[in-house]
Image (cartoon, rainbow, N blue to C red):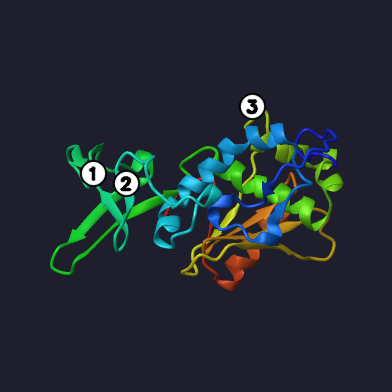
């Protein structure tokens, strides 16, 4: 077997979830032939950035984390969660000062940390806030890590390990001179713990595009270095009046 990251042969099985395990990766996207153990471990920090972005979704839909652990939010300064007797409980600090929650100090939610504009309607018993996608510099690399994994699944690990996709490896590893890659986010979401992926076919396209759905949120990823497929997609979406958002600037949800 060949590792699609270091391009070295390996024989010890290493379980790789094409979409991070804590995001409801379907069984058909769990592989043992795409990454060696050291590369799998070293890139886990990229996966964690993506999991953190969807922590709210995992709590709402009760998606188990790695090794079946219950979902929990404990890495946000202004947001915490825990599993109560009647289901998940969330705590959001709308400011202006710090507060004590469940024995921990909760700082005011801030746009810098990705959570802001907290609102509460006591009469209706409702509350909400605004969350940003893409405010972590590892977010897009994590999406493109899925893209290279999908090339290995839909084409072959040998094709994914070829020099043609060195630009993806450099981008995922956050190398200084890496070509910057983008992605498109559909503004319409499906409510539910729906996760999966498929290749977007188009005649004459040498490098595949993929439609990636993570817990009801859909991304389109172009694996070509010049992102020509993504440009065509954006032009078509604009002509059809379809709602979409192009990274890298953070987007509010």
Instruction: Classify 10 Å Cα crowding around label 2: few (below 14), some (14-19), many (20 and above).
Output: many
Pick the front one: 19 or 67: 67
Q: Nearer the viewer, mark 2 or mark 1?
A: 1
Residue 65 at x, y = what percent? Answer: 50, 50
Mark closest to the chain's N terminus, 3 or 1 = 1
Residue linked to disc 3: 176
Point 37% across, 40% down: residue = 113
Q: Is residue 67 left or right of residue 94?
A: right
- Marks 2,1: beta carbons within 8 A: yes
Residue linked to disc 2: 80
Quadrant of the image occupied by residue 41: top right
Q: Nearer the viewer, mark 3 or mark 2?
A: 2
Quadrant of the image occupied by residue 239: bottom right
Residue linked to disc 1: 102
Q: Quadrant of the N terminus?
A: top right
Residue 217 at x, y = what percent? Answer: 52, 61
Mark closest to the chain's N terminus, 3 or 2 = 2
- As helix, strand or loop, the secondary structure at mark 1 comes to loop
Q: Is residue 112 left or right of residue 124?
A: right
Pick the front one: 111 or 236: 111
Point 77% across, 55% down: residue = 153
- As helix, strand or loop, the secondary structure at mark 3 comes to loop
């Amino acid at each position: 077997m060949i590792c699609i990251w270091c391009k070295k042969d390996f024989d010890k099985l290493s379980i790789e979830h094409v979409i991070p395990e804590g995001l409801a990766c379907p069984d058909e996207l769990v592989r043992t032939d795409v990454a060696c153990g050291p590369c799998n471990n070293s890139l886990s920090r990229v996966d964690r950035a993506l999991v953190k972005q969807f922590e709210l979704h995992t709590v709402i839909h009760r998606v188990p984390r790695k090794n079946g652990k219950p979902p929990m939010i404990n890495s946000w300064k202004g947001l915490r969660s825990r599993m109560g007797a009647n289901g998940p409980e969330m705590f959001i600090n709308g400011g202006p000062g710090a507060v004590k929650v469940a024995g921990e100090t909760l700082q005011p939610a801030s746009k810098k940390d990705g959570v802001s504009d907290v609102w509460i309607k006591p009469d209706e018993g409702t509350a909400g806030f605004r969350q940003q996608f893409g405010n972590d510099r590892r977010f897009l690399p994590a999406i493109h890590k899925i893209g290279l994994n999908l090339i290995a699944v839909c084409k072959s690990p040998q094709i994914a390990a070829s020099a043609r996709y060195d630009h993806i490896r450099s981008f995922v590893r956050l190398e200084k001179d890496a070509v910057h890659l983008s992605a498109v986010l559909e503004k319409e979401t499906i409510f539910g713990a729906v996760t999966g992926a498929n290749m977007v076919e188009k005649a004459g396209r040498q490098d595949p595009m993929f439609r990636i759905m993570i817990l009801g949120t859909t991304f389109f990823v172009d694996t070509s270095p010049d992102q020509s497929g993504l440009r065509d997609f954006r032009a078509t979406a604009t002509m059809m009046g379809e709602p979409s958002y192009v990274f890298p600037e953070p987007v509010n949800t």
